[in-house]
Amino acid sequence: MTDGDSVDVLRISGLTLDLGGRRILGGVDLALRPGQVHGLAGESGSGKTMTGLAALGLLPPGARTGGRIELEGTDLLTLPARQLAALRGRSVSMVFQDPSTSLHPMLSIGHQLTDHLRHHLKLDRKAAKERAAELLTQVRIPNPREALGRYPHQFSGGMRQRIAIAIALACEPKVLIADEPTTALDVTVQAGVLRLLRGLCDDLGLAVLLVTHDLGVMSAIADEVSVMRHGLVVETGPRGRVLTEPQHAYTRQLLDALPGRSTV
Amino acid sequence: MSPRWVPSKGAGGKSTGVEGAGGGDGDRLPARRPTGRRLPGRRLLARHPLARFLLRRTATAVLLALGVTLVTFILTNLVPGDPAAANLGQRAIGDPAIVAQFRHHYGLDKPLPVQYVTYLGNLLHGDLGESQQSHQPVSTDLSTAVPATLELAGAAIVVSLIVGVAFGVVAALRRDRFTDQLLRVVSLLGVSVPTFWLALLAFYVFFYRLGWAPGSGRLDPGMTAPPDVTGLYTVDAALAGQWPVFWSAAGHLALPALVLTAYTVGLLTRFTRSAVLEVLNQDYVRAARAKGLPGRTVLFQYVLRAALVPVITVAGLAFGALLSGTVLVESIFAWPGLGAYAYRSATTLDLPAVMGVGLVVGLVYLTVNLAVDVLYGVIDPRVRVQ
């Protein structure tokens, strides 16, 4: 997209998606770089979430794709299922919108934090547990060792999302796709989760794709912003430029819809 | 009786398994209540909510047993017919002295309320009365009939759970494909074919025609029962190391048990299928896939665990029904179990025996119910006592 093509860790080019005879994505281009948060904005149904799911190969059955999604040069769309599964959760991982439904209610936090660790990294039970406790510390869950034996319903919404983030980060992925990670949370804890994401992105050199319809969230932490509409990226650029001097009429519309917009 | 027994969530077919178990606020395992004052005797109960839960359930059981005896007593006495006429021979019935003696012996000459209170008083000492038909204490009759049925129903439910859950999972994963359609037909047949007809057919084909199955009863003729430990012949024979007896008992058990599985397999297949489909749509399953876990792990650890909650509810009900409702199969295979005993007692107006059967059936349902509730807690931590 920009200069330094070589540093793009995930590059989506000309991605198309058809589902049940309908065109959902009409040629999406996006590039993610390590240590940067790339915000993907747009109204519901604009194809933001589908773009994220496509990068994980988790599209609904019957979906037909075109274009390329390259992870460090490897095209994920043409990769055999087995190899894709090996990358999923390992190199590319995902945080879902609502942690009260994306964590299994009947499995302990420790179980959910360690099963993919043990699968991908072949850690033994003890090493995986060590790593899990470390991760919980990293996302600032108090008493991490004790927390491992507890269940999702014993945590607040914000803590659950922190745990979901810890799960996503367990195998040290290069790319993190966060699909509306704060939408289901109380406003009071949203900022904390965003700050955590930003910090992890900086400290670990993660490339983050932040899918959100909330431009306020976007302006708080994104480096680059892309705006989607009807399955197409209508505008891409550094946050400052896109949010202050929008080139596209739709971006302007979105910005005008923000409360207290005059001071953006 | 507890209204939760009605499988409102599990049997609705639309249960998520997740919401179903978590949302209940009835007298499930109680949440910890702040205990202001601490009486010394209550400390155990306060600290062990499970103990409190079990204690309350036991109290319910006593009330239920009382209700069962009352209802059975009233119903049995409402039935037109005379126990003396049903139990005494043709000649004896013509002799008023014998009839009077019969009535006196069984307390039938006393007013009904007195009869009932006497029965309850004896019940407190574990005395269920004497069967007018077998002239043995009802408790003795039941102690052989109940294990026989338990063995039959236990074998049937174990096989049903394995086959039914497997069928249901496969049907859900192959949704709307050929395998799913095939399993739909199989389960529909299983649920709709009358069990007695299937029993007759199976007996005719596998015993009379093919000679694969042994005849009726629990053991081959001339074989003695293994030493009584559990009353389950297969288990007792295995414990005693009497392998010929074990194989004979297992052989006799196989056909009636398989006949009984037809219905429960059909039932469990349908419930498992819908429960699994429901869970497959959950976010946490997608999240598990996003973690790159192998399909097997996702299925067994993430999907099945949640799907089993409604399945266990139905399986519990089915087990209760098997334990108390095998009358026809037991009479066709001459299986000396509870169903056969209930049938014989009812047709001869054998009041103490009928009441005994009623009590056992009530307790069976209560126990199965309790087991299901405890299992909920094992599967779902949100139901568990903190």
Image (tube, helix red, strand yellow):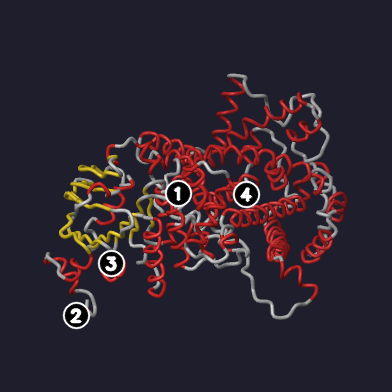
Query: Residue B110: x, y in percent?
Result: 82, 62
Query: Residue B80: x, y in percent?
Result: 68, 55
Whether the residues at callouts 2 and 1 have beta carbons within 8 Å, the answer is: no
Q: Which mark is residue A171?
A: 1
Q: Are marks 2 and 3 on the same chain?
A: yes
Q: CA distance from mark 2 to mark 4?
A: 69 Å
Task: From the image, state whether disc 3 or disc 4 is nearer to you.
Answer: 3
Task: From the image, state whether disc 2 or disc 4 is nearer to you.
Answer: 2
* Residue pointed to by mark 3: A218
Whether the residues at callouts 3 and 4 have beta carbons within 8 Å, the answer is: no
Q: Which mark is residue B320?
A: 4
Near mark 1 (Cα within 10 A), the count class, few <14, some 14-19 or many ≥20, is many
Near mark 4 (Cα within 10 A), the count class, few <14, some 14-19 or many ≥20, is many
* Residue pointed to by mark 2: A262
SS at mark 2 in the image? helix
Query: Residue B57: x, y in percent?
Result: 69, 63
Residue at 81%, 54% in the rendered image: B128
Q: The disc labelled 4 sits on which kind of residue?
A: Gly
Near mark 3 (Cα within 10 A), the count class, few <14, some 14-19 or many ≥20, is many
Image side of residue B261 versus residue B343, left or right? left
Near mark 2 (Cα within 10 A), the count class, few <14, some 14-19 or many ≥20, is few
Image side of residue A195 versus residue A137, left or right? left
Is A22 placed above or below B34 here? above
Label 2 marks which chain's residue? A
Q: CA distance from mark 3 to mark 4?
A: 58 Å
How many numbered dots are placed on residues in this image?
A: 4
